[in-house]
Image (tube, rainbow, N blue to C red):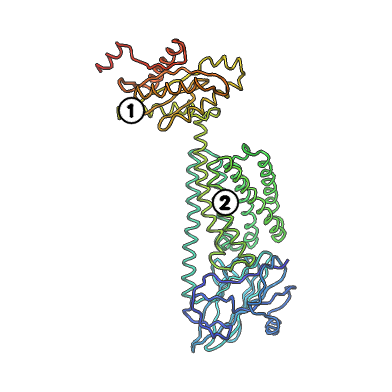
Amino acid sequence: MRAILLWGMLLLVGGVITDANARSIAVTGDMPAATVQDRMAFYEDPDAQLSFERLRARAPELMQQADAMPTGLGFSRSAYWVSIELHNPSSEPVSAFVRQDYPLIDHLSVWMPDGTGGYQHWETGDRTPYDTRPIAVRDFVFPFTLAPGSTQTAYLRFKSDGPINLGLSVVSAPALLNITSSEQLLFGAYYGGFLVLVFYNLILFLAVKDSAYVYYMVYVVAYGFYMSVHNGLAFQYLWPGSPWAANQSLLLLLGISLLFGLHFSRVVCSTRRWSPGLDRVAVVLLVTTAALLLVTPFVAYQYLILAYSLLTVLVCVTILVLGTLSWLKGSVPARYFMVAWIGLMVSVLIYMGKQFGFFPHNFFTQNSFQMGSLVEMVLLSLALGARVNEMQKLGFSDALTGLANRRKFDQVLPLELEKWHQSKSSFALLVMDIDHFKRINDEHGHAVGDKVLAALGQLLRKNVRRPSLACRFGGEEFVLLLPGAGAEQAMGLAERLRVLVSTKPLAEVNVTVSIGVAVCDSFAMTRSGALFEAADTALYAAKQAGRNQCLLYELPTEERRLVEAV
């Protein structure tokens, strides 16, 4: 395969002074960034053996204009030469810069005009120490000087084991300062957003102790460092003296991101529960990623890049399948999860389209998946929050009936009583019990008994509306909290539920229920236990009176007199 060769510029901002019939770029001391896309010439050196002197001597023969440049070249061992003709239309010497804004170039050889008819020469790239660059920036910026009225050609030679992107522009010092200042501000916001997400989720992890937060934080940190390598910031600030780290860290951090991103996806999407088979596929990918990570420090970059590219595709497809399956199963976290990953995939496709020549190289296409990744991290954080809510809901739910459980009842009842004490509005509690439930289990089996409980739970969910709450208290006993309900309303609902149960078989079994009702409207209930005991007493009385009926608890006369006196 041949190397990916793209052209473009960082910012398409106007104003290049040029002769319409010439390809030279007119250079001034205050010019904005000028594209060289349609003005540069190029040559592919398949053997990567051509010297600068031989190229200059044969330039008219070898160099082709940019409009003949092929696209979608893939990986290659070739070297690529680019020439840019620069013209100084003024009567004074002028200095400016040629900028290459894609920093992941292994070997970059540059010859820039020095103002005397000669050339300044640099051998740099991310395979050489950072201090080989003439100007300390995250990418590559090369100064040049043109004598008054002169025209001279700048030459650049690109050679890389990975894809080559030509993000070349000619820019004056003031314009370069403005561009780099704006970029630094954007990078600061981007990485600042990552730090906020990490610390925010660290606090949540300390509060809820959910391991998914650990996987998320490692994923965010690894991905953030991966992007810093991709942007050239890591080489500039973290390991400027280590070209090995500048190259291998890209793959190591990508591998860590894939490892923890996939593991995080398994946990959030609950694939072990929804699809054990697909979960085993994810585990195989996790083991493969871990094995590749172990050999990465010891294998050359050019042999690993294709393996990591294939692994990235497999992991991303697997994650999307995991999320889709979980979403179809009704998982709320999976909704945020899928929107996050689909958004990231779209931004990656835009970037890859730029890599293979389908889109131009500009600020948006170069940084598309960086912007997409920050949006993804925010949405994944929301998915974690939805997961916590879902786990809390499951912790307060009865799996068989789908109603709230006793734990939820014990939490809500004191709160509702506190509201009642403050507002003195009505509040009622119903305790319901299935009549002769043991006989149902004995005659039909426990499986049928479970179906009866599930059917009753479905009936209650259908007929008990918020803010009322229906709970399975335990066994065949259910409780209903009715905020704002007085004796008449509570007894009306109880009777309606009793009739519904008795007139329609549950799971093909004829069932009746007894219901006890207690109301906090005419007397004080100082303890939640007292209210429940009152309703339970009424339930016991209904059982004693023959079952299949509803009874309202009433205070004994002496107790009522004491309450009224208080």
Residue 120 in sight here:
no
Q: Which residue is mark 2?
A: 341
- Mark before the other along the chain sequence, 1 or 2: 2
Measuring from the top left, give residue 517's x and y in whole percent.
40, 19
Q: Quadrant of residue 554?
A: top left
Measuring from the top left, give residue 61's x and y in whole percent.
70, 84
Q: Which residue is mark 1?
A: 420
Q: Quadrant of the C terminus?
A: top left
Q: Quadrant of the N terminus?
A: bottom right
Dot 2 amino acid type: Trp
Q: Nearer the viewer, residue 468 or 398?
A: 468
- Which type of secondary structure does the marked residue at label 1 adopt? helix
Q: What crowding class fits label 2: few (fewer than 14 Cα within 10 Å), some (14-19), or many (20 or more)?
A: many
Dot 1 amino acid type: Trp
Residue at image position (64%, 63%) is 243
Q: What crowding class fits label 1: few (fewer than 14 Cα within 10 Å), some (14-19), or many (20 or more)?
A: some
Measuring from the top left, give residue 136's x and y in whole percent.
54, 69
Q: Nearer the viewer, residue 191 or 389?
A: 389
